[in-house]
Amino acid sequence: MSFTITYNGKQKVYDSKVRILDIVGTSHDYICALVNNRVRELTYEVYFNAEIVALTLEHTEAVRVYQTSLRYLVAMALSRIRPELDIRFSYNISRSIFVQILNGTKMADRELANDLRAEMMRIIAADYPMNRHVVPNDEALKIYEERGFKDKAAILGYRPEKTVHFYECDGYLNYMYGYMVPSTGYLDKWLIRNYAPGLVIQYPRAELKGEIPPFEDAPTFGRTLKESHRWAQATQLDNVANINEAIKTEAGTIELINLSEARHYQQLAELGVRITQTNSDIRLICIAGPSSSGKTTFANRLRIELMSRGLRPIRVSIDDYYLTRDNAPLDEDGKPDLESIYALDIDLFNQNMFDLINGEEVQLPHFDFIQGKRVPGRLLKVEHDQPIIIEGIHALNDMLTDSIPKHQKFKIYIAPQAQINLDNHNPMSLTDLRLLRRIVRDKKFRNASAHETISMWPSVRKGEFKWIYDTQEGADFVYNSFLPFELPVMKRNGLPVLEEIQRDSEYWPVAERLIRMLKYFVELDEKWVPSNSLIREFIGGSCFQDV
């Protein structure tokens, strides 16, 4: 039967299957396409009525396909120049991919970087096709075992599908858990640099309209990721298969939860020591981090930790200092920009903090979100030995507290710094983890659909890049809020919400990606999760819910 395809506003009738490449052309500017709002490779054959949108590197889904294909290219090139090396990819500083050598005693030196660069350029120039092959799981297991891919074999048993989609390129075979470009010639935008003990691969970013960001060293962030990976390796919780194995039994589940929570307690204890012993002049404890990092629960737990050490901290909410929507700054689309620091009454916050620290009684504001304006809040006076805890996305920005001397402020950056992989070649996205947290929380506490949350996410991300990420390097402490058991818990809470999105929705590509991430995890019953756990902030049942 014939079918109609709409592309660039024009319709054309076809009588047989047609590749997207044959519709949009072979320009390497196009990386993948949306077919009725579903992400498809350019080699996909359409055989039904469809609207097609070709995507460039200015689109996040195209960047994901490009980045997945680039990891394949790096693994392929390394297998040819140094076949004895086992490598692991992870997301790292400056929005890049880190290549870690897992075996051998030698670091990734300049010679290796130069050889890798040359081999990648040779493969790109050859423009080898990326050929997709579908094989049954038992055959895939044999392929993994023949090539020494023990990590891929371990996760295979948790795949709900009965087949695996391998990609073959000039004799090289690998599986990357994502869509690929049609051929190696598409992958001509990247940079390699040495970053001890491994290599950093930079790639284009959608938020920069398809350009590669300038490399920016971030030692604080880098140390946090390194420590996260060290702990995950030491506890054997650095990949999905090991986490699933840990929760096969009730005893294993309880042990995993307690082990994960113990890591959070260790960080809180370290913070308690730092705050109480490092500087007796600390008056303001500032907590910031990107959306869905767990700031509220963390602030409550830190308060309890400090109370156990003889301090009497009080909390002040930055959210109470929002301007009315009519007075909020506008974004580039002319809409109120609530992610901007200028959406807050900066002068009033500064004055109130200054007066409190100087022993004055202050009438704090309270923002009534129903009325959309500030109303009088509590009267507050603090003693000279009472630190004030503030938390919010702008808490580390000195504009908000420029009347307070730096030596009186202790800055804490919080984010889930997960270093967890599906396998060595496929890291999991930290951003997707936070988005999933927010989707579950918004549904639980605001009855907001996944559709609504996903639609707002680009604006949230834009605000994070502009206002939050740079503040991490000025923090006195970075708190890793990731819990290794949280994705098995999120599977139970998140899948039903994500599956409410219709497949023809413009937000389905994001939902589909998150569903694919969750499907590899064994579901975990949340009944074992403590009431003070940070993850309770998102799934409900927190003892801090009304605090």
Image (spheres, helix red, strand yellow):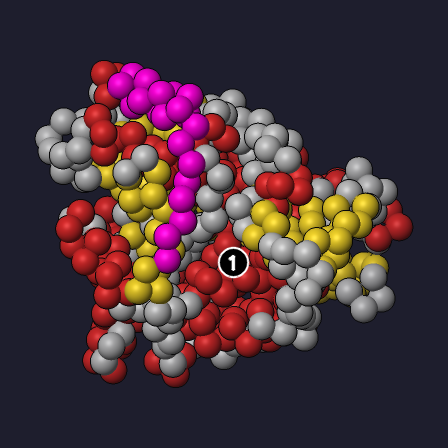
In the foreground, 307 or 302 = 302
Q: Position of residue 142 (x, y in %)?
A: 19, 58
Q: Position of residue 356 (x, y in %)?
A: 63, 49
Residue 109 appears in which quarter of the rendering? Answer: top left
Residue 372 appears in which quarter of the rendering? Answer: bottom right
Drawn side of residue 236 relative to residue 288, left or right: left
In the foreground, 128 or 534 = 128
Q: Residue at x 58, y 27 (%)?
A: 211
- Residue 356: say if magenta: no
Do we see residue 406 in this rendering?
Answer: no
In the foreground, 13 or 334 = 13
Q: Quadrant of the C terminus?
A: bottom right
- Residue 123: say if magenta: yes
Q: Residue at x 49, y 39 (%)?
A: 182
Q: Position of residue 167 (x, y in %)?
A: 36, 46
Per the image, label 1 sits on a secondary structure element best described as helix
Drawn side of residue 220 relative to residue 181, left or right: left
In the foreground, 38 or 435 = 38
| Circle 1 residue | 513
- Compared to residue 527, the image places residue 117 above or below, namely above
How packed mark 1 is, by other alpha carbons closer than 10 Å (few <14, some 14-19, many 20 or more), is some
Q: Residue at x 14, y 38 (%)?
A: 103
Drawn side of residue 114 relative to residue 516, left or right: left
Instruction: Spot the residue most to the left.
Output: 105
| Magenta highlight range | 113-134
Drawn side of residue 100 relative to residue 505, left or right: left
Do we see residue 65 in this rendering?
Answer: yes
Q: Residue at x 66, y 48 (%)?
A: 458
Give the amino acid type for the residue marked by disc 1 in the picture.
Arg
- Compared to residue 222, the image places residue 368 above or below, namely below
